[in-house]
Image (cartoon, helix red, strand yellow):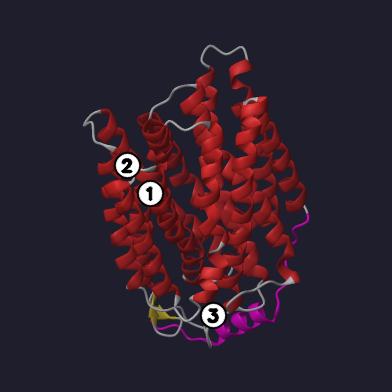
Amino acid sequence: MGESQSGRNLRRELVLLLVVVGALGVTSGIFETTLNNFLSDTFDITAGQRGKLEFPRELPGFLVAALGGALFFLSETKLGLLAGSCVAVGLAGLAAVGDRSYGVMIVFLLIWSMGAHMLMPVMSTITLSLAPRGRRAGRMGQVGSAGMMTTILGSGLVWIGLQYLHFSYRAMFITAGAFAVVAALAVSRLHPLPARPGQRPKLVLKRRYSLYYLLCVFSGARKQIFITFGPWVLIKVFGEPAPTIAKLWIVACVIGIFFQPRLGRLIDRLGERVILMADAVVIVLICLGYGFAERLPLLHPVHLVYACYVLDQVMFACGMARATYLDKIAESEADVHASLSVGVSIDHAVSMSIPVLGGLLWIRAGYPAVFVAAACVAVGNLCAASFLAAPRPGARIAEAERQAESTVMPD
């Protein structure tokens, strides 16, 4: 790979990026597979309460553009260090005192969430910077696949630790926090990104990116319904424990290891429009499976819900198409990180309200109604994705291509 991009050693940078992604994968594999069971077992909350909890949990995601703007003087790598440290502190707090008070648990959940959401645009920006134009979706798929491998490790720790070794939720959170520290240290060792004249923009809102913003609205609604109520169906309707959720994550990650690199190459080859439209169609089918598996003449309806949960997790990878679409239409390199942050904020503005409405809908009309509503959201996403068009190369892309042609790479 050699040296390029203002003296960066791309091989070293990619190795460090994989360490960051790998450590975060373990953290995610542990935390995401235990949180819902932890809430159910420790605080015995209802579907309505679970929906309301998403407001404070997703609030940092809504504020991520403001946070990134306030910290505009930090490079992406320094911002990544801060974000990873917040994830570690939040998990340490949940481990130490999170089970003593619902209010205290929310405080540390907020700290974890602030770090996790700041990391989203940081990791996307760094990953995009480590691939040549025209192959960036493929690189995102490769990096995502690496993260899936270590997410399997985190999920496996939950499965074995809780089912066979009888570990506590506290032990799981401590382990997740330790890997978050590794991620924070590794991201701080990355070289600052090139081609960043001046400071990062504090905030970017442009009409040019309006379709990207609309896709983020639908993404926020779709994501939060499944993150909140998909596991809740398994836990509350079918009585599944945390080790079962961990096993399903492992299956999804094994599929994702092979699926994500191929998906990235498909995005580069077919374009974002085809991929995002296909994703929306699959989501409609998943919604119907979640909502009506129990009413179908099946011997074991929970197996259909298992399949929906796994497929849902796998399809989240299609979100990389939004990032690559933005990267293609961005007017400048500096716009990319700021616009990704705005996208995360828009996504989470929706995420904060949808679970509350979903919880009320669950209580008043039953859980199938939640997934009928989710199917309607997926149809809206399908319509929005249909308006995507392959952008014509702009001045930024043309200039990059001219520079690439005139640059002599070292042997």
Left or right of 392 in this view: 187 = left
User: In this orientation, which residue lies closer to the viewer: 301 or 116?
Assistant: 116
Neighbours of disc 3 within 10 Å: few (<14), some (14-19), many (20+): many
Q: Give the percent coordinates (x, y) of residue 154.
A: 33, 44
Q: Is residue 329 left or right of residue 241?
A: right
Q: Residue 268: x percent and y percent? A: 60, 59
Q: Which residue is mark 2?
A: 100
Alpha-carbon distance for marks 3 and 2? 41 Å
The three-letter amino acid code for the residue at tag 3 is Arg
Q: Is residue 181 above or below residue 400?
A: above
Q: Quadrant of the N terminus?
A: bottom left
Q: Which secondary structure, mark 2?
A: loop
Q: Which residues are magenta?
A: 387-411
Residue pictured at 51% horizontal, 44% vertical: 53
Residue 187 marker:
none
Q: Are marks 3 and 1 in contact (CB under 8 Å)?
A: no
How far apart marks 3 and 1 lie (CA) works out to 35 Å
Which residue is under mark 1? 104
> In this view of the protein, can residue 58 be seen by the observer?
yes
The percent coordinates of residue 111 (x first, y second) are 41, 57
Query: Which dot, 3 or 2, sits closer to the camera?
Result: 2
Tags 3 and 2 touching, CB below 8 Å: no
Q: CA distance from mark 1 to mark 2?
A: 7 Å
Pointer 1 and pointer 2: residues touching (CB < 8 Å)?
Answer: yes
* 250 to the left or right of 302: left
Is residue 404 a member of the stretch shown in magenta?
yes
Q: Which residue is mark 3?
A: 200
Earlier in the chain: of badge 3 and badge 1, it is 1
Q: Residues within 10 Å of mark 2 (few under 14, many from 20)?
A: few
How many labels were placed on the picture?
3
Amino acid beneath label 2: Arg
Residue at 24 percent across and 35 percent down: it is 167
